[in-house]
Image (cartoon, rainbow, N blue to C red):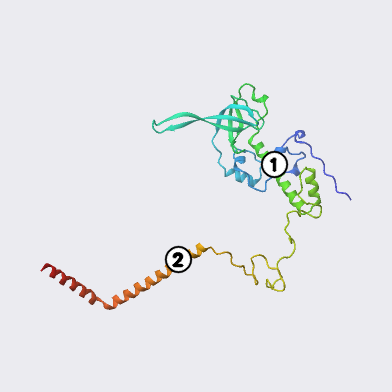
Amino acid sequence: MPPPTLPQKKDASEASSYDPTLPSSMRDYRLTTTDFHLKKPLPHRIPSQYLQNSTSEILHQNERAQREKIRTHKTIRGVVVSAGKMDKTVKVRVPGQTWNGKIRKYFATHTQHLVHDPNNSLVPGDVVELHRLRVSTAVHHVVAAIISPYGTPASARPPIPSADERLAEYKEHRFAKLHRRTLRREAAKGNPDAIRELRRMGLDPGKGVEAGKGETANLQRGVGKKRNPSKGAVLGEKGQKLPEGVLPGGKHEVGKINERAQRNKGVAVKREEQAVENLLKAKEKGEELGREGLSAERESVVKDVTQGRGRLG
C-alpha cells in the first residue's frame, strides 16, 4: 500500500492569517524565506553584529539567549556625502566633538565612514542611521534606515533591509555553505548522490573522485592499510620495516644536538656544583667556630685593645 500523500501547503501570501510562531504541523501555509531561515538554527554561534539589532521572536532559544547577552551600540546618524561612485557602498559623514585640552573646550568635528548600501538606495544629502557590521576590510557599517531623504522620497527607492532580513540573509548563505561542505565530504568517500549533486550545482567534486571510489589524488601510499605491527611485536624484528627516525624496539633516535645549548648546559651544571660546594664549606666553618666558643672571641677583643693602647702610648 503506497504511503498517503501529504497535502501541499499554500504560500504565505494566500494564508488568511499568517503566524510564523506556529509549528509546521499547525499551519497549512509555508513560511516566507526570511522567517524560514530565521527560525532554522545554525549549528554554530552567530557573529554578534548580526544579532545586536535583531528583534525577531522566532529565533531558536539558543540564538535568543546569545542575543540577550549582547549590548547594543549607541545610535549613529550621519549625512551621505558621496554615492554612486562604488557599487553598494557610500560615504557618510558622522558629526562629533573633540576636546581641546589646552583651551579646555569642545570643538565640532566629523568622521567619514564607508557604509554598505545593499540595494543602492542612497543619494548624496540623505540623513541616515547606521548599524555596525563588518562587511569588508574598509567597510564597517551598514545603512539601517533613511531618516530624512533628499530629493526622491524613500518610498520610491529600493527598500533598506532590516536587521532581521540581514540576519536571515547571513543564515541562508551559511546554510548553503555548510550544505556544499557536506556534499564535498560525502563525494570524497565516493557517494554517487553527492557527486551528482555537486556536478548539478556546477561545482567540481574533487580530483580523482568517482562513484564508489572516492578521492585518491592526495592520499599517501599505504593509507587505509594496517601500518603498525600486531600487539606484542617488537619493531625491527621479523623483517618489519622501521618508520623514519625509529630504532629497533620502538625507541626514537636522538636528533642533532645543539652545541651552543650543550655548552650552556655544562656551564649551568658547573655553577650548581660550585654553589653546593660553597654551602658545604660555609657549614663546616660555622661548626668549627661553634666548637671554639667564646674563647676565640675574647682573645680577639684583648688583642684589639692591647694594640690600641700601644698606639696611644
Identify the residue shown where x is 63% and y is 28%: 85
Please give the name of the residue rendered at 64% of the width and 23% of the height, measured from the top-left corner.
Answer: 153
In the image shown, does 276 or 141 lie closer to the viewer?
276
The residue at 77%/36% (across/down) is: 11
Residue positioned most to the top: 151
Judge left or right: residue 288 versus residue 122: left
Going 23% across and 76% down the picture, which residue do you hit?
296
Between 58 and 254, the residue placed more toward the observer is 254
Image coords of residue 302 (percent x, y): 18, 73
Q: Residues within 10 Å of mark 2 (few under 14, many from 20)?
A: few
Q: Is residue 54 above or below residue 287?
A: above
* Mark linked to residue 173: 1
* In this picture, residue 266 sits left or right of residue 155: left
Nearer the observer, 172 or 221 = 221
Q: x, y (%) of residue 312?
A: 12, 67
SS for tag 1?
A: helix
Image location (x, y in percent) of residue 38? 68, 41
Residue tagged 2 = 267
**Position above or below: 52 against 160:** below
Amino acid at circle 2: Val
Q: Residue furthest left?
A: 313
